[in-house]
Amino acid sequence: MSIAISTLRLGTMSNFVHFVTDKATQATFLVDPSWDAQAIIAHIESNQLIPKGILLTHSHGDHISALLAMLKKYCLPTYITRPEFRLGRARIKKPHYIEDGDCLTLGESSIRVIETPGHTVGGASFLADNALICGDTLFIDGCGRCDFYESDVEQMWNSLQRLKTLPDDTIIYCGHDYGQRATDTLGHQKQTNPYLLIDDPDFFADFRLHLQSEYRSIPFAPSSREEMQAIRQRHQKT
């Protein structure tokens, strides 16, 4: 693998700030810098990383609260989808717009952009080798909220169905430490994550918008196909 991923867990919402590094050159993308700019800078300096840009999976405040401090320190390009920038939260002067299928060069490596709307209208994930940095689209044994004004549960369903087609050995790096482990393979998550187990978009929407609080709490525990089928049957009868 030509890419290394390092991570800080920061803030009261257990955010993950990821650093995507090309091993050959130490060139690094920062993903969703938030909460503690000094901790992020210390990580960069102590590991001799060379910042080359900032990737935003989305623009909720808990994911961009250290963005301006990073830009002041390093003067980096910030990559964001056009629909996400239009929400007006990432107040940067010259965004570098990305869209689905783009490949971003990082040293001797390449990062693929996968648009994953749902949690927000302009959500994005980033595939680096077999590492998927997916923000709040997919959690370990969970997925992001879909009840914000800029959310769309149907888009979330479509985004997750798309991510499910990636190789099973893809390693998930999500935006929050909400599971019982920090990372997992996509193949294992397809066996334990309720939102990857559900095979009906209508039940997916009902569970995500109405039923999750009855059955799920942080830290999310692994589920099973049998559990999700039983929940569906229970609520079909009522």
Image (cartoon, grey):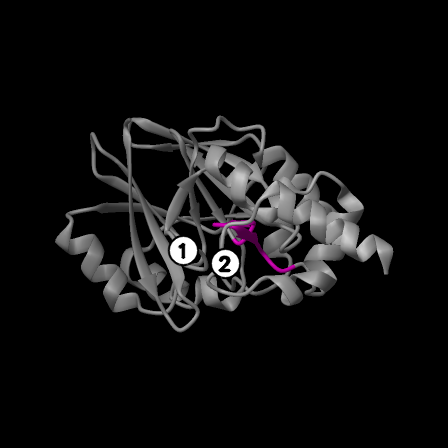
Q: What main secondary structure does the magenta stretch of the protein show?
A: loop
Can residue 117 be spotted in the picture?
no
- Give the x, y percent position of residue 75: 33, 55
Label 2 secondary element: loop
Can residue 13 be spotted in the picture?
yes
Disc nearer the start of the sequence (2/1): 1
Label 1 secondary element: loop
Q: In screen coordinates, is 235 left or right of 71?
A: right
Quadrant of the drawing holding the N terminus = top left
Give the image quarter of residue 197.
Answer: top right
Going by the numbered disc 1, the residue's amino acid type is Gln
Q: In screen coordinates, is 206 left or right of 175?
A: right
- Give the x, y percent position of residue 103: 47, 30
Seen from the viewer's position, the closer of residues 128 and 209 is 209
User: Total of numbered circles in the picture?
Assistant: 2
Q: Residue at x 55, y 36 (%)?
A: 114
Q: Residue at x 66, y 51 (%)?
A: 118
- Give the x, y percent position of residue 79: 47, 47
Q: Which residue is mark 1?
A: 180
Seen from the viewer's position, the closer of residues 77 and 36 is 36
User: Magenta region: which residues?
Assistant: 136-145
Q: Are marks 2 and 1 in contact (CB under 8 Å)?
A: yes
Rate crowding at label 1 as few (under 14), some (14 to 19) or many (20 or more) other CA atoms within 10 Å.
Answer: some
Seen from the viewer's position, the closer of residues 134 and 231 is 231
Considering only vertical position in the picture, is 85 above or below 36?
above
Going by the numbered disc 2, the residue's amino acid type is Phe
**Residue 204 in magenta?**
no
- Give the x, y percent position of residue 91: 51, 64
Q: Which residue is mark 2?
A: 220
Quadrant of the drawing holding the C terminus = bottom right
Distance CA(mark 2)–CA(mark 1): 7 Å
